Image: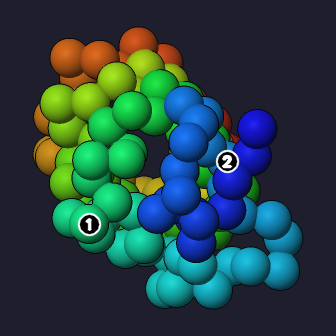
Amino acid sequence: MSLSFTLIPQLQCRSCHCPRPGRAGEFRGGEITSLSRSSNSTKLKEVSVLNLYSCKLTSLKGIHIGFAGGRLAELNLGLNSLETLPAELAQLAPSLRKLWLDDNR
């Protein structure tokens, strides 16, 4: 099941995908600020697969806020514009098993 991140308050699944084309505004400025809100952290800790493939992301700053200490096992960040990875990504290491970074800068 694919859910848009605007629906996070009603999040009921364990797998989330990038918003549909035409909804790029949900990642304004190429950042994941809609995910890193502390109000989403309880719901996001239940997500085990996050597909952010081709979401025009340039930064992962704050990614640990929603997922650290959670169940995130697979994170797909392919086909974005990432040049570096923040140190806070290491906070996902206890559960993260697959990290896809293909086709970035």
As displayed, is residue 91 above or below residue 86? above
Q: Is 7 above or below relative to 47?
A: below
Name the amino acid, label 1. Answer: Ser
Which residue is pictured at 76% across the width and 38% down the height?
1
Q: Residue at x 34, y 24 (%)?
A: 71
Percent coordinates x, y for residue 23 in the rendering: 74, 79
- Which of the 4 quarters of the picture holds residue 13? top right
49 over 87 or under it: above or below:
above
The residue carrying pointer 2 sits among few (fewer than 14), some (14 to 19) or many (20 or more) residues within 10 Å by Cα, namely: some
Q: Amino acid at mark 2?
A: His
Image location (x, y in percent) of residue 14:
54, 31
Image point 42% across, 72% down: which residue? 34
- Whether residue 90 is visible to the viewer of this picture, yes or no, is no
Which of labels 2 and 1 is toward the front? 1
Q: Determine crowd level at label 1: few under 14, some 14-19, many 20+ residues with C-alpha closer than 10 A.
A: some
Residue depicted at x 41% and y 13%: 97
Q: Quadrant of the C terminus?
A: bottom right
Report the residue marked by disc 1: 39
As drawn, the label of residue 17 is: 2
Q: Is residue 19 above or below residue 14?
A: below
Q: How many marks?
A: 2
Residue 21 location (% of width, % of height): 84, 70
Callout 2: helix, strand or loop? Answer: strand
Q: Is 71 left, or right, of 22 in this rendering?
A: left
